[in-house]
């Protein structure tokens, strides 16, 4: 029994008490996520920015420590064990702690977004978006406090972006829209939670009434069925509203991912060009570090975008014949520098015939295996990583084994869950946002395969993929374009992009392949250039003024049919990669898609398919 002197407004309101109890139960997870996010943002900042971030992190962790104490006291007061007569005061302290934490994030956004490096700003934006997205669920018991929290997390950062450069204004406006969507989602989740609690209480009251009024059983049953049906419809409607909010969140993240890809194309492209220059050792190390950071950010963006497509059911596979030896070679080329930098062994064992060709989505397969090798290298400190590729009949089996830390038994059940980390402590050294294995499992399932994991703590882990990849005949190769000594005999490529920097980057990247480039700044110029002379291939941007790339492609295809001219390969070079977008490119007559930011390896493969060159092209890419 709670003494009379311990009564309070909250305790006298069962709904308010239930909501407060739910909020208290959610709080430890919320504070853990905030601590991890704060540490992640601090570690992601550049060394020159660190002093401010260390001070901010200290204040943030101090506030979180105080909130933990307040939360434990609140839990005891709710249970009536201690401080029961201070329940209202402890509830106010609990809400104040949440608002103070949100205010610290708002201060960080306002203080650092205008002056920090681009990569740090994007990390802050992604973290704030994730915190706000999580708050729609875990803070749904707190109607007013939850809304204040979400607004403080998103609005200051969005307004800071709007007040900044024109290129960041779009992100700021999208941030405001995202804030409104998250507030609507929080409102819907709160209403759903209140309905659930009220329905639970009402059902309990109905059962008690049935026990007291057994002589009126039939009438009470009819009333109960009507009430349950009504509540079920209400819960279904609330669930649909919550799903709509989640879909809006996915669309927003996809848009943000697209906007991030465009500047990354310039960063990564210039970095790849600089590596060919005569640089000093220190300069080369800095360029390689820049390229590595850009690639890591691109991979995180790709993961988020792929997750959105998986959630929306829009991810489509693109199977084509591929040689197993080429897959093994590309994986070795991609991960050997990281293995050597860590002093680890990396072995690629191809147990099938080297010349064997399989049919499957090699890009998605390479993406999955790359995540597994990357994770293995992260958590291996001695020994190495072994990748074995084998298969019989229509199945392809790939095993990635390491001699690293292994995975604890209690973690094995959650490693494939979204945003989970094998090491989620505040001292973890491995990066990532916790979606890699979730994405791998989704991609493997989409390919009709299965992925399993086995691990022994302290002895390493083994991840095994078994994917349907039937034996196939090699894909037909375009004949190599003969190249004489003169420039006029070189393969020709028309580069169409309204951004001069993008045109220069593509021209510089294709220069080692002996390809002569022509340029057009919009779709209309591209059509005119195609009319003036034949081209071996056209690299076409999509979003351009005057005439966009889709319209220009459609015009070229129509004239080819009308004039009987040979079909020229047209490749969409774009950062817009959602399923419905790539489908529109194909419908317009484009032959393939080269994603931005452009990687030299992907560019080499595309050139080999478009203008020929085969192994020679791949060799130049490796060089």
Image (cartoon, grey):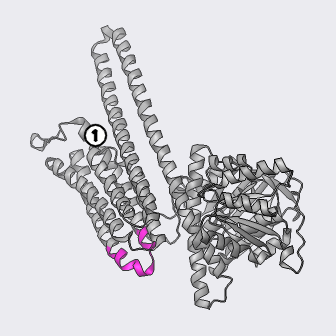
Q: Where is residue 16, by image quadrant?
A: top left
Q: Residue furthest bottom?
A: 280
Q: Where does the image place residue 623, in percent across and percent down from the top left?
A: 76, 79
Left or right position of 126 against 332? left
Q: In the image shown, does 89 or 523 lie closer to the viewer?
A: 523
Task: Identify which residue is drawn at 65% across, 73% down.
Answer: 505
> For the residue labelled by badge 1, is the local secondary structure a helix, a strand or a loop?
helix
Q: State which quarter of the image contains the N terminus.
A: top left
Q: In the image shown, does 595 or 342 lie closer to the viewer?
A: 595
Magenta-span inclusion, residue 52: yes
| Residue highlighted by disc 1 | 18
Left or right position of 449 against 356? left
Left or right position of 557 against 141? right
Q: In the image shown, does 459 or 331 lie closer to the viewer?
A: 331
Q: Give the dominant element type of the magenta stretch: helix, strand or loop.
A: helix
Task: Identify which residue is drawn at 79% across, 75% down.
Answer: 513
Q: Where does the image place residue 96, in percent across and percent down from the top left?
A: 23, 56
Magenta-span inclusion, residue 621: no
Q: Where does the image place residue 224, in percent across and percent down from the top left?
A: 36, 18
Q: Where does the image place residue 347, in percent across and percent down from the top left?
A: 74, 72
**Position of 279 relative to 304 (above/below):** below
Q: In the image shown, does 144 or 512 lie closer to the viewer?
A: 512
From where the camera sits, is residue 578 visible? yes
Left or right position of 194 against 546? left
Task: Identify which residue is drawn at 87% across, 53% down.
Answer: 472
| Magenta region, residue range | 39-55
Q: Where is residue 185, by image quadrant?
A: top left
From where the camera sits, is residue 379 visible? no
Total count of labels: 1
Q: Classify mark 1: residues with Cα within 10 Å, few (<14), some (14-19) or many (20+).
A: some
């Amino acid at each position: 029994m709670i003494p009379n002197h311990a009564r309070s407004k909250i305790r006298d309101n069962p709904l308010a008490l239930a909501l407060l109890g739910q909020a208290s139960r959610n709080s430890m997870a919320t504070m853990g996520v905030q601590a991890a996010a704060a540490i992640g943002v601090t570690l992601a900042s550049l060394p020159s920015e660190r002093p401010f971030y260390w001070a901010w992190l200290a204040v943030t962790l101090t506030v979180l420590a105080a909130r933990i104490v307040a939360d434990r006291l609140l839990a005891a007061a709710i249970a009536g064990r201690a401080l029961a007569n201070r329940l209202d005061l402890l509830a106010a302290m609990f809400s104040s702690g949440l608002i103070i934490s949100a205010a610290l994030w708002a201060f960080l956004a306002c203080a650092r977004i205008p002056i920090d490096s681009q990569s740090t700003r994007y990390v802050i934006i992604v973290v704030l978006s994730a915190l706000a997205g999580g708050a729609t669920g875990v803070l749904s018991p707190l109607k007013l406090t939850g809304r204040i929290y979400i607004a403080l997390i998103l609005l200051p950062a969005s307004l800071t972006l709007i007040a900044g450069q024109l290129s960041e204004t779009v992100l700021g406006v999208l941030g405001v829209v995202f804030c409104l969507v998250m507030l609507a989602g929080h409102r819907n989740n709160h209403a759903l939670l209140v309905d659930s609690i009220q329905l639970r209480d009402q059902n309990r009251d109905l059962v008690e009434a049935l026990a007291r009024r057994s002589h009126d059983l039939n009438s009470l049953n009819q009333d109960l069925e009507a009430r349950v049906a009504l509540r079920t419809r209400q819960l279904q409607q609330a669930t649909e509203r919550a799903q709509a909010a989640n879909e809006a969140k996915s669309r927003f993240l996809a848009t943000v991912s697209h906007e991030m890809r465009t500047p990354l194309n310039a960063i990564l492209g210039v970095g790849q060009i600089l590596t060919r220059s005569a640089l000093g050792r220190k300069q080369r190390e800095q360029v390689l570090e820049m390229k590595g950071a850009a690639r890591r950010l691109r991979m995180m963006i790709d993961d988020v975008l792929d997750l959105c497509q998986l959630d929306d059911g829009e991810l489509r596979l693109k199977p084509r014949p591929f040689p197993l030896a080429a897959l093994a070679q590309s994986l070795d080329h991609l991960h050997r520098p990281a293995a050597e930098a860590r002093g680890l062994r990396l072995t690629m064992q191809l147990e099938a015939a080297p010349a064997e060709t399989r049919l499957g989505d090699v890009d998605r397969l390479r993406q999955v295996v790359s995540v597994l090798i990357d994770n293995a290298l992260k958590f291996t400190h001695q020994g190495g990583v072994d990748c074995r590729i084998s298969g019989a009949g229509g199945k392809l089996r790939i095993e990635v084994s390491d001699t690293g830390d292994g995975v604890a038994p209690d973690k094995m059940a959650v490693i494939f869950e979204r945003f989970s980390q094998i090491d989620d402590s505040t001292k973890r050294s491995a990066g990532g946002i916790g979606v890699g294995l979730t994405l791998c499992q989704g991609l493997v399932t989409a390919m009709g395969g299965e992925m399993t994991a086995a691990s022994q703590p302290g002895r390493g882990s083994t991840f095994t993929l078994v994917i349907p990849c039937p034996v196939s005949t090699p894909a037909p190769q375009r004949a190599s374009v003969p190249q004489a000594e003169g420039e006029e005999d070189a393969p020709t490529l028309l580069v169409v992009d309204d951004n001069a920097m993008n045109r220069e980057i593509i021209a510089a990247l294709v220069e080692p392949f002996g390809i002569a480039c022509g340029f057009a700044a919009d779709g209309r110029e591209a059509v005119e250039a195609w009319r003036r002379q034949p081209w071996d291939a056209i690299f076409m941007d999509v979003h351009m003024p005057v005439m966009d790339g889709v319209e220009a492609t459609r015009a070229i295809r129509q004239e080819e049919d009308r004039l009987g001219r040979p079909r020229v390969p047209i490749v969409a070079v774009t950062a817009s990669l959602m399923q419905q977008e790539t489908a529109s490119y194909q419908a317009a007559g484009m032959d393939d898609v080269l994603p931005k930011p452009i990687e030299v390896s992907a560019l080499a493969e595309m050139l080999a398919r478009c203008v020929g060159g085969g192994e020679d092209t791949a060799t130049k890419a490796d060089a």
